[in-house]
Image: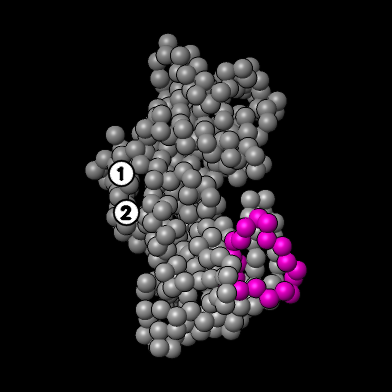
Amino acid sequence: MAEIQLRNVGKRWGSFVGVHNFDLTIADREFLVLLGPSGCGKTTTMRMIAGLEDVTEGEILIDGKVVNDLEPKDRDVAMVFQSYALYPNMNVYENIRFPLKVRGIDPATHDEKVRRASAMVELDDFLHRKPAELSGGQRQRVALARAIVREPNVFLMDEPLSNLDAKLRVSTRAQIKNLSHELAVTTIYVTHDQIEAMTLADRVVVMKKGIVQQVGSPTDIYDRPANTFVASFIGSPAMNLIEGRVEGGVFRAQHVDIPGIGAPDGPLTLGFRAEDAGLATGQGQITAPIYTLELLGDATMISVRVGGALVSVKADKSFRAEIGDPVSFSVPSEICHLFEAGSGARIG
Ligand code: ATP
């Protein structure tokens, strides 16, 4: 059982604020993903939970107990990093066993624990190999097994897939998801990859410049992004965002005319997702020359330029046209997300 509470946690170095006012309770067995661009404070937040970084403000509690002053080794958390940090002279078996030795766990239990952990990550056949004789994906699985073997209450994972190639990332991601389910351990996972976040998380925390932008399930965050930053960070492609003006319930920008918009007259940022819109059969709400066409296999992505922005719509895979041909998109008001022009905050 491990519930983690962050109470207005902050991190400063001199006048630079790395993490600001992070306030969240992570439920026992929850899989929480910290997501955001480089430098947004994800790793710092996790290092504070691990005890590798002092907390400047606020409190961190694990199972109701303040751990601000506890040494990392006394927090019962296991970390997996993007660099696997395996011992090159030890074989896989010894690497996985290492945490048990360090912690003075009864040697009579080591063999069973190592074999169980290595079986979970399908390394049974590699126990006698040295790290240099393994692929990147296998090394990362050794690092996972080394965390599992400790049977911690909390897993902290910092971009554990980032050194793997695209195919291995997908299969290792699936394995992590399966393991976290099987082990039922509270997991905090750091990534800048929104697909990893969406596929793994029970809840996602989106961060920007040390500040939490939104906390929610992957569906919440995808369907109701709290601001234009979250909207443009989640989804592939990112949400289309158009800056324009509302006049009498009609949103207008260059090439764009969308009626039925429930916002007062004035500037507005309007968003919609490529897959929610489509080609118009008659006159649509956006009409512009095609800027690019991308064949995705199962669909064709059509992009046009609207003001300074590129706006993409997913069409049928059989769609064919030339760059520069006029195209018309159907963008009904029901699929539109509305954001305040200045702050980017969601208004509808
Ligand atoms: P990345 O994805 O690149 O790892 P991140 O979101 O994990 O980024 P952090 O490593 O948490 O970001 O860093 C947050 C901010 O704090 C960054 O601007 C970073 O430069 C700054 N920072 C980190 N460690 C220190 C330090 N020891 N002293 C001063 N500033 C630091």
Q: Which mark is residue 27?
A: 1
- Magenta range is 311-329
The residue depicted at 38 percent of the width and 56 percent of the height is 220
Q: Which mark is residue 243?
A: none
**x, y percent for residue 120:** 50, 24
Q: Quadrant of the N terminus?
A: top left
On whether residue 220 falls in the magenta region, the answer is: no
Marks 2/1: CA distance? 10 Å
On whether residue 322 falls in the magenta region, the answer is: yes
Q: Is residue 135 visible?
A: yes
Q: Amino acid at mark 2?
A: Leu
Horizontal side, residue 61 vs residue 142: left or right: left
Residue sitting nearer the eye, 82 or 194: 194
**x, y percent for residue 339:** 42, 74
Residue closest to the far front: 282
Q: Is residue 58 above or below residue 302?
A: above
Residue sitting nearer the eye, 203 or 241: 241
Horizontal side, residue 9 vs residue 288: left or right: left
Q: In the structure shown, which secondary structural element does the residue marked by tag 1 occupy?
A: loop
Residue count near mark 2 (Cα–Cα under 10 Å), binned few <14, some 14–19, many ≥20: some
Q: Which mark is residue 24?
A: 2
Residue sitting nearer the eye, 292 or 148: 292
Q: In the structure shown, which secondary structural element does the residue marked by tag 2 occupy?
A: strand
The residue depicted at 42 percent of the width and 63 percent of the height is 225
